[in-house]
Amino acid sequence: MPGIAARKTWFKGRSLSTSTSREVDLRSVDWGKVGPWSPLGLALLVVVLGVTAGVTLAFGSAGARDKLAISLILIGMGEIALYQGVGILWFGPRVAARKEALVTATPTSNAADVASGKATGLVELKGKAAAPGRDAANGGTMTSPVAGVPCVYFRVEVVRVEEDRTNTGDGMQRTINRRTVLDQEWGDPFWLEDASGRARVDPTGAEVRGRVVAQRQEGPQRDDQLRDAMQGEFRARGFDITLPWKSGWSGPTLGYETTEQAIQPGDALYVLGAVAQRDGTPVVASASASDRCLIAVGTEEEVITQARADARTAILGGALFAGIGLVVAIVGIVLLVVA
């Protein structure tokens, strides 16, 4: 996925990490080590396909050997989906449960104690967001590119809606696919204020759940015209993006769906993170890639409710992936058995 290019000088935010996760935040899981394309996942795939091919060539009938290539493709696709589904089923609820446990067990600290250095380690803060530079002409805020609202953080997701057409022999089958072509967040460290004072919060690498400030749909229109129009609109507002060209294998574009989340000054915030020193100033931030700071617009109760919803989503999504993978793999095996 292409990243965000250079922005106008008045656009004060800096680019943070890209993300493809939505309801279930599994970025704390090192998929490079345990995912289907990791060395472990690829090794398992090679073993499964190798054993299948070896047994078929050694003991299978002539018909089975003729269908070996198709069967290996189906078994391989099924194994990948099954592996991914089992991974989501295993890690998803645990990530959500760990988040809920931390939120429930961590006592609330005062912002003033964090700022003075009295509060250390993992802290929980509740208060309101405040811009980092009160004396600046614009209050130290950014302007979000879609809704055009002043904010200290925003995230933009663009989804391309495509129609795929498949000839099934009995006619054309239409399938609607949604592909995320941009998912980018921008922000600078900002303040959280409560009755005791204020503390600095850094959203870099954090799990941020902002408030939806804009949702819109564009199209239908020619993909190149719509793509150029959207890029031009964003760039006119200082948000320099490049949307990827549509793949030649995909169907016609039906439109684009754009969603923007933001944190605005005055929004109620819940923050759970580690106190670190940045340029001699205490700041609440992510301790590491696996111990990410949580920044959410809303209350502690809403964060707990969302964590439980995340666990349910992981169970359903993982079961769906695993089920599809199992069915596809069984079809591949059946082709060999009945040959």
Image (spheres, grey):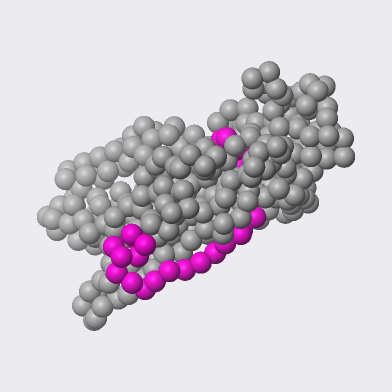
Q: Image height check: is 219 above or below 331?
A: below
Residue 242 in view here: yes
123 sits left or right of 175 in the view: right
Q: Position of residue 173 (x, y in %)?
A: 30, 76
Does the magenta run of residues contain 189? Answer: no
Q: Image height check: is 48 above or below 33?
A: below
- Quadrant that contains the C terminus: bottom left
The quadrant in which residue 117 appears is: top right
Q: Position of residue 27 (x, y in %)?
A: 53, 40
Residue 106 in view here: no
Instruction: Please give the name of the residue rendered at 15% of the width and 52% of the height, measured from the top-left corner.
Output: 65
Q: Position of residue 35 (x, y in %)?
A: 43, 39
For this rendering, which residue is in front, 339 or 249?
249
For this rendering, which residue is in front, 223 or 61?
223
Q: How many marks?
A: 0
Q: Position of residue 143 (x, y in %)?
A: 57, 50
197 sits left or right of 73 in the view: right
Q: Which residues are magenta?
A: 203-229
